[in-house]
Amino acid sequence: MRVLIVEDEVRLADALSQIMSEQKYAVDTVYNGTDGLDYGLGGQYDVIVLDVMLPGKDGFAVVRALREAQVATPVLLLTAKDETTDKVAGLDCGADDYMTKPFAPEELLARIRALSRRQGEVALEKLQFDDLTLNLSTYALERAGRSVHLGFKEFEVLRILMLNPSKVVPKEELITKVWGMESGAEDNNVEAYISFLRKKFFFLGSRVGIGTVRKVGYRLEAEDDS
């Protein structure tokens, strides 16, 4: 599962990130509403955990902008307030759930799991492209009874490619979603992981390849049987 945390209390944000990482979730963390909106618009997240009181844009404005942009990712709002009017405002602007601080980590994780099940994509356990299957639970790439384990970044790159089987995925998009907007990763980082994946496709005897569209990005391709 991939989660975005938008929380300006740095210690709390980092603690939440640690808790979710221990659950094997892929986590991005930002500390203001402007970055939260940018990440929410540009990333493929299963759940967004969003504080209400944020610098830049408040949580209500972020949710409203996401919904106006047709981003349907479930949003869990966090706030220090416990007023019914705030809860109603949050739900009315497009949030899916609401928690008041302080809260138990176990409840937060339970609510994230419940929200993720509302997303059809998250309910999937595997992604398929031609003769290759990507197991979303075990990070295994499978073909014809054989499998190979993928590292985290290999898994994320391939997951994005499989979720976009009919389009070219730009290198910039892969860098943003896999390494993060402020990571300093460059094209050669992406190229290295594309190479790793191609070797694993070959190891499995797959007819799937990763095509390069020069100066643009990559897409999955399958050899024609004929």
Image: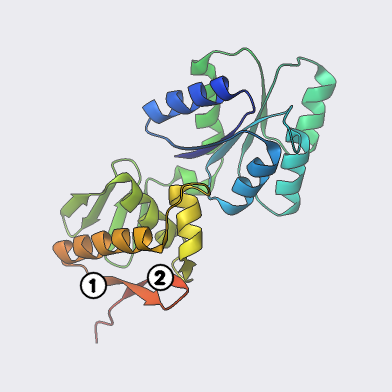
Instruction: Please name whichever residue, 35 or 119, is drawn nearer the observer in this view of the structure.
Output: 35
Q: Is residue 89 left or right of residue 41?
A: right
Residue at mark 1:
207
Count of numbered labels shown in the rendering: 2
Expressed as whole percent of the image width and height from the top left, the position of residue 72 reads: 64, 48
Q: In the rendering, at what x and y percent does residue 131 appear?
A: 26, 65
Outermost residue to the right:
85
Given the image, on which type of amino acid does mark 2 rest? Arg
| Dot 1 amino acid type | Arg
Q: Nearer the viewer, residue 95 or 49?
A: 49
Measured as percent of width and height from the top left, residue 111 is found at: 55, 26
* Residue 132: mark: none
Disc 2 target residue:
219
- Circle 1: element type: loop
Q: Callout 1 environment at 10 Å: few (<14), some (14 to 19), or many (20+)?
A: some
Instruction: Let me know if residue 117 appears in the view.
Output: no
Q: At 37% from the left edge and 60% from the top edge, which residue is drawn?
A: 190
Quarter of image, res 192: bottom left
Tell me how far mark 2 sits from mark 1, CA to CA: 14 Å
N-terminal-most mark, 2 or 1 = 1
